[in-house]
């Protein structure tokens, strides 16, 4: 799941929400973990990338190239 979640905290939250949705008997609630997944990928991770680039600059780009998913490694924020 490293490619989907940059932070283990997001994976933990996804598993917890998914577990609660399985326990519930409402089918609509089963959609919530996947809504969370989309929000993480489209909202939270890009915000974190911008903040880290603003704070650390080129060092963060180098770090993402070496250890991260590298998807935003060539972007300038």
Image (spheres, grey):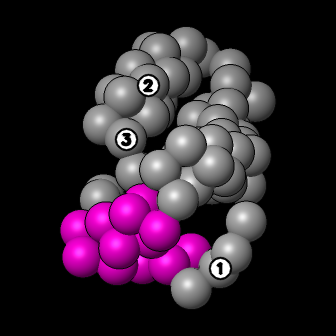
**Residue 69: % across, % down:** 38, 72
Is residue 38 toward the left or the right of residue 70 in the image? Answer: right
Q: Distance between the residues labelled 3 and 1?
A: 20 Å
Q: How crowded is mark 2: few (under 14 residues within 10 Å), some or many (20 or more)?
A: some
Tag 3 near tag 1, CB within 8 Å: no
Residue at (47% x, 50% y) in the render: 56
Residue at (73% x, 66% y) in the render: 77
Q: Name the residue under label 3.
A: 7
Bounds of the magenta span? 58-73
**Residue 2: % across, % down:** 29, 59
The answer to which of marks 3 and 1 sits earlier in the sequence is: 3
**Residue 38: % across, % down:** 68, 51
Between circles 3 and 2, the one closer to the viewer is 3
Q: Distance between the residues labelled 1 and 2?
A: 28 Å
Q: Residues within 10 Å of mark 1 (few under 14, many from 20)?
A: few
Instruction: Point out which mark residue 13 bears.
Output: 2
Q: Mark 1 points at which residue?
A: 75
């Amino acid at each position: 799941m490293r490619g989907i979640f940059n932070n283990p905290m997001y994976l933990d939250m996804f598993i917890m929400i998914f577990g609660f949705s399985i326990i519930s008997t409402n089918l609509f609630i089963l959609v919530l973990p996947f809504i969370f997944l989309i929000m993480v990928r489209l909202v939270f991770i890009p915000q974190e990338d911008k903040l880290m680039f603003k704070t650390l600059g080129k060092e963060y780009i180098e770090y993402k190239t070496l250890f991260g998913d590298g998807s935003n490694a060539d972007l300038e924020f």
